[in-house]
Each structure stands twice: as C-alpha cells, then as structure tokens.
Image (cartoon, rainbow, N blue to C red):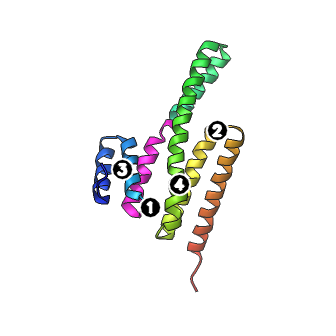
C-alpha cells in the first residue's frame, strides 16, 4: 500500500497501537521518502525503531545463558545458543542498518531545524552504539568510531545553539 503521507502517518499510529513495530517502521520509511521529518513524524520514526531494536535485551539474555553453558562445559548447548545468538545479531544488524541509512542519506542533510539535526545525529550515535554492543573486531571499532563522531557532531550543534547571539 503506497498511500499518501497522511495515510502512512495514520497507519503508523494504528500499527503502533497494535504493537506491530516492524510494520510501523515500514510506514514511517514511506513517510520519510526523501524529505526530513519534523515533530510528530520524527517521533513516530523514533518509536518505531526503538521498539524493533528491542532485540538488544534478547541478545543480552542469550549471551548470558551462553556464558553459563560454557562454564558448565555443555558444548552441544553452546553450539545451539551461538547459532541463535547469531540470528539475533543478524536481525539487530539489519534493524540498525535500516535506521543508520536514513539519517545519513535522507534526514540530516535536509533536516529543517537544528533540533532535528541534533535529534537525527544523536539517533545515529545511538544505533551505532547498539551495533558496538555485540560486534567484534574491526566492525566493533568502526561502530564505536561512528558513535563517537555522531555524538561529537551533536555536541557541536548543541554548543552552537546555546551560544549567545550578538
């Protein structure tokens, strides 16, 4: 369903009430198109992704169980757990990749206000931080560097906004 911008915003609100956050993400991605969003649309986008990325808690739980089974030397269970953890990591990578492609390609360059730019840069920092939680090696380093860069950019914009006008 392509729908108009207003229809997609309405449907995003509807599926939010039904707690169908993956579909909410889809509707909000249609809303965004090639234009940055403000206010309500920006908040709906944030809610959609925050709820989809909730798998982070699942990853932490599964990782904790994996450590317990490793300490018990239960190799068969550890193999099963690692496979399942890899599935969760793939889902998280996909979700974070989806939101990270939006700010870089669509949102930050065309954001209307400094508040929106700050919001999207902070979001980019947050989702890179989520990746850094479970990635390893160079992927982890890259995610951590991207997190730091986004947060630094956010801080600079905040400082400029708070600077007295003369």
Disc 1 to disc 4: CB gap under 8 Å: no
- Local packing at callout 2 (Cα closer than 10 Å; few below 14, some 14-19, many 20+) is some
Residue 61 visible to the viewer = no
Disc 1 to disc 3: CB gap under 8 Å: no
Point out the frontmost of discs 1 and 3. Answer: 1
Point out the frontmost of discs 1 and 2. Answer: 1
Magenta-colored stretch includes residue 153: no
Residue that label 3 marks: 27
Q: Which tag, 1 or 2, sits closer to the chain's start?
A: 1
Spatial distance from mark 1 to mark 2, Cα to Cα? 30 Å
Identify the element where label 3 is drawn: helix
Identify the element where label 2 is drawn: loop
Q: Which tag, 1 or 4, sits closer to the chain's start?
A: 1
Point out the frontmost of discs 1 and 4. Answer: 1
Spatial distance from mark 2 to mark 4, Cα to Cα? 18 Å
Q: Position of residue 56 (x, y in %)?
A: 53, 37
Residue that label 4 marks: 123
Q: Residue at x 48, y 70 (%)?
A: 113
Disc 3 to disc 4: CB gap under 8 Å: no
Residue 106 visible to the viewer = yes
Q: Position of residue 160 (x, y in %)?
A: 60, 73
For this view, does 164 lie left or right of residue 4? right
Residue that label 2 marks: 135
Please identify the residue farthest to the front as the structure is shown: 2
Spatial distance from mark 3 to mark 2, Cα to Cα? 29 Å
Spatial distance from mark 1 to mark 3, Cα to Cα? 14 Å
Instruction: Compare residues 31 and 88 and report the one nearer the observer.
Output: 31
Q: Which tag, 3 or 4, sits closer to the chain's start?
A: 3
Point out the frontmost of discs 3 and 4. Answer: 3
């Amino acid at each position: 369903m392509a729908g108009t911008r207003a229809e997609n915003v309405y449907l995003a609100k509807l599926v939010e009430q039904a707690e169908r956050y993956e579909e909410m993400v889809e509707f909000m991605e249609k809303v965004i198109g090639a234009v940055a969003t403000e206010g309500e649309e920006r908040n709906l986008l944030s809610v959609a992704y925050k709820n989809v990325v909730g798998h982070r808690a699942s990853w932490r739980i599964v990782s904790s169980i994996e450590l317990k089974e490793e300490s018990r030397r239960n190799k068969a269970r550890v193999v099963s757990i690692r496979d399942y953890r890899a599935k969760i990591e793939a889902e998280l990578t996909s979700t974070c990749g989806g939101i990270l492609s939006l700010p870089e390609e669509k949102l930050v360059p065309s954001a209307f206000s400094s508040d929106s730019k700050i919001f999207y840069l902070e979001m980019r920092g947050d989702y890179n931080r989520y990746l850094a939680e479970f990635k390893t090696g160079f992927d982890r380093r890259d995610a951590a560097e991207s997190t730091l860069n986004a947060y630094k950019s956010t801080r600079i914009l905040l400082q400029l906004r708070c600077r007295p006008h003369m």
